[in-house]
């Protein structure tokens, strides 16, 4: 059993996966789509990964504003959650993702990863932070 973490963006979805013991999260990959509304291939890739890794639930980053309000991105994330649940048959848990992208970018900066290469990894690292936060809450 594993848990998948997702960082849903307008053009990309970062994917992270837990270890079988549900202790650590590892960044896995970034799914890129051609346009924001084209989700069929993205959902198919997520469904395939969920089957391959024997995932039993998905944690989806929920982009609450810093002032605790929900904006347009929250609405799109909730729509994506419903599509994921229908497509995979798995429960999808919304998890506060505030500052995960900032933290991911900071780690890459501290690791001396060139700015041009950061965009390829930022979403999957952010997905790792989202998933690790959820795993830590389970193990607390």
Image (cartoon, grey):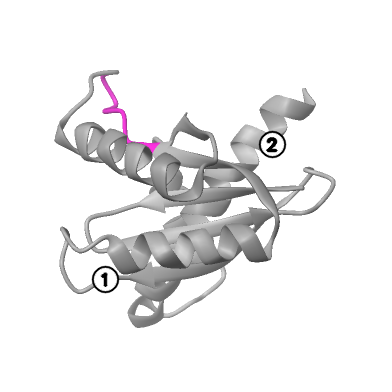
Looking at this view, is 29 or 110 the one in front? 29
Q: Which of 39 and 112 lies nearest the eye of the viewer?
A: 39
Residue 109 visible in rendering: no
Name the quadrant containing residue 61: top left
Q: Secondary structure at mark 1?
A: loop
Q: Quadrant of the C terminus?
A: top right
Disc 2 secondary structure class:
helix
Where is 41 relative to 94, above or below?
below
Res 86 visible: yes
Residue at the top extreme, as displayed: 68
Q: Residue at x 29, y 18 (%)?
A: 68
> Image point 23% across, 24% down: which residue?
70
User: Residue at point 34% right, 37% down?
Assistant: 82
Report whether 37 appears left or right of 124.
left
From the image, tell me which residue sits under label 2: 135
Q: Does 73 sit above or below residue 37?
A: above
First to last magenta residue range: 62-67
Mark 1 packing: few (<14 Cα in 10 Å), some, or many (20+)?
Answer: some
C-alpha distance separating marks 2 and 1: 28 Å
* Left or right: residue 40 compared with residue 20: left
Q: Which residue is mark 1?
A: 33
Where in the figure is residue 121, as x and y percent of width and height?
A: 45, 70
Q: Earlier in the sequence, mark 2 or mark 1?
A: 1
Percent position (x, y) of residue 66?
A: 29, 26
- Cβ atoms at labels 2 and 1 below 8 Å apart: no
Magenta stretch: residue 80 in it?
A: no
């Amino acid at each position: 059993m594993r848990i998948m973490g997702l960082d849903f963006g307008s053009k990309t979805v970062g994917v992270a996966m837990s270890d079988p013991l549900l202790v650590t999260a590892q960044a896995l990959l970034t799914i890129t789509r051609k346009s924001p509304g084209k989700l069929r291939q993205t959902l198919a890739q997520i469904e395939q990964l969920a089957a391959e890794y024997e995932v039993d639930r998905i944690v989806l980053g929920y982009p609450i504003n810093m002032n605790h309000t929900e904006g347009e991105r929250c609405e799109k994330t909730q729509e994506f959650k419903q599509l994921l649940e229908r497509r995979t048959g798995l429960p999808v848990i919304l998890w506060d993702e505030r500052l995960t992208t900032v933290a991911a970018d900071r780690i890459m900066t501290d690791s001396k990863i060139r700015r041009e290469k950061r965009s390829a990894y930022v979403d999957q690292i952010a997905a790792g932070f989202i998933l690790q936060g959820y795993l830590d809450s389970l193990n607390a």
